[in-house]
Amino acid sequence: MGSKLAAEALWKANGLPASWLSRLHLTENPDPAVNSSFKLGSVAQTTIGLSGLSAAHFHQLNTGVEQNVSVDVRHAILEFKSELYYTVNGELFSSGELWDPLAGVYRTKDDSFVRIHTNFPHHRQGILDILGCAPTKDAVAAALLAWDSVAFEDAAAARSMCATALRTFEQWDAHPQGRALAGAPPVQLVKVGDAPKRVPDASRRRPLEGVRVLDLTRVLAGPVCGRTLAAHGADVLWVTSPYLPALPALDIDTSRGKRTTQLDLTDPADRATLRELLGGADVFLQAYRPGGLAAKGFAVRDVAAARPGIVYASLNAYGWDGPWRDRRGFDSLVQTATGFNAAEAAAYAAHSGEGGARPLPPRPFPMQAIDHAAGYLLAFGIHAALCRTITEGGSWEVRVSLAAVGQWIRSLGQLAPGVGFAGEPLPPCTLPQAPEVRPLLVELKRAAGDGPGGAEGGVMCAIKHSAVLDATPVREGDAPMRLDAHLPRWLPRP
């Protein structure tokens, strides 16, 4: 299945008018757009295209303005790797800074593999505590040779740490979580409350102008969603905890167009501030571990009751049903657990003639494709829900999980090895930037914030948005480039 058919299926499944599909212009045969056996060109072009088309439709419901949306597939692929190519004051953040030195794949006693995620210090220490070893890659590798892969996965999950065993597609399909996820859509809209219809606003200059978004997400899909909403004109206030470490290599890129503030939701005063902000919000975007916000009074039912007409967008790793529904996860772990790394490794071995009797080491996608796809699909779902608030009224929840997005990617099919790995590799991360990258860069200034981190200057160059709306071009804006640049308050509505 290519981009056009994939886009049509998701668009119709979320109750949007089929007549609008003629306004979406995508490459007829987009794959292979990069060196992978999976249809990542279709994935990137479809998800970004749907986020743009749904924003355009919401704009039309408000203003009557109709427009076309187009997405270049190679530009979309590079946008799926945007965290690699940006510069600040002329300096690159190297790809090595995206990962903690201990993160990665390790062989286990049962001649299989596990992948561990240690980018946050408390996750790193938790893995080391389980293994009882020194904080070096060699020590971790030696310690994991005493563990079976699934046993270590279970031990990590019991302590809310982040590790997954390598599985094939067949093994994942037979797993209780794989069975629970079967058939789950990548985007789901659920009406969660009654509210009057939203009154259209014909004065909007951009699709989301006047829309206020509380963005309570981290790494990577949720922040990509918030960045996309900001590009279409929303006032996005990114709220993070002052006690969770920053990840500058990711946070800087995904701060574009947003305002950033920090609240400690274990503090009653800061929870009260968030409730006050909620009263003026249109979208509540969150990626807390399931149940994490409920204990603080911000479950979907609480938010819908406090702010009728809200769109509550929820992102998690493994879906809303099954034994793993509360389990932590990231793109790299989901790729390993659900079969992609094993399938990509087997395809590459068939292409290259490599391989042997032992199990093949996992081979990841050339980018965090599940994260990025989930972020754009979450934006698409939010736009679709905002459209419902005009046409039907009500409060809506948008549900997206990384595993269900992965399941959708898998449903698009796999390319023959000789085809998939003939795709063009990603350009190198170098200075000066590669010739393919340079025309796609846009310059952004550091936002002049009013918070504790808002005084510094600087210039950022980053991959511009690949969705082209011919009547309402995206807003590149500026970037706070840190997580504490603004006070926790809304801008006046236009």
Image: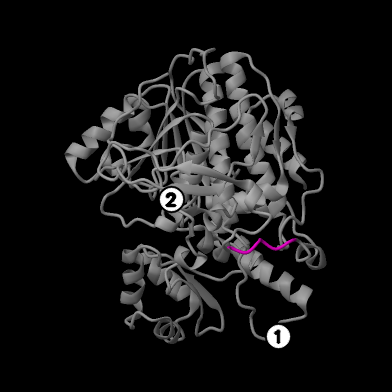
Q: Of marks 1 and 2, which one's residue comes earlier in the chain?
A: 2
In the figure, 261 relative to 84: above or below? above
Label 1: which secondary element: loop
Q: Quadrant of residue 188?
A: top right
Residue under numbered circle 1: 356
Magenta residues, start to end: 424-429
Left or right: 409, with 415 as reference point: left
Label 2: which secondary element: helix
- Quadrant including the C terminus: top left
**Residue type highlighted by circle 2:** Ile
Label at residue 102 = none
> Residue 491, percent across and down?
35, 26
Marks 1/2: CA–CA distance: 42 Å
| Residue at x-position 72% and y-position 54% | 39
| Residue at x-position 71% and y-position 72% | 346
Q: Are marks 1 and 2 in contact (CB under 8 Å)?
A: no
Taking depth in this image into account, of 172 and 420 the one nearest to the observer is 420
Label at residue 252 = 2
| Residue at x-position 56% and y-position 52% | 82
Q: What secondary structure characterizes most of the magenta part?
A: loop
Q: Residues within 10 Å of mark 2 (few under 14, many from 20)?
A: many
Can you see residue 180? no
Which coloring applies here? one colour
Q: Residues within 10 Å of mark 1 (few under 14, many from 20)?
A: few
Can you see residue 332? yes
Q: Quadrant of residue 428?
A: bottom right
> Residue 254, percent across and down?
47, 47
In the figure, 167 relative to 22: above or below? below
Left or right: 482, with 179 as reference point: left
**Residue type highlighted by circle 1:** Gly
Residue mark closest to the camera, 1 vs 2? 2
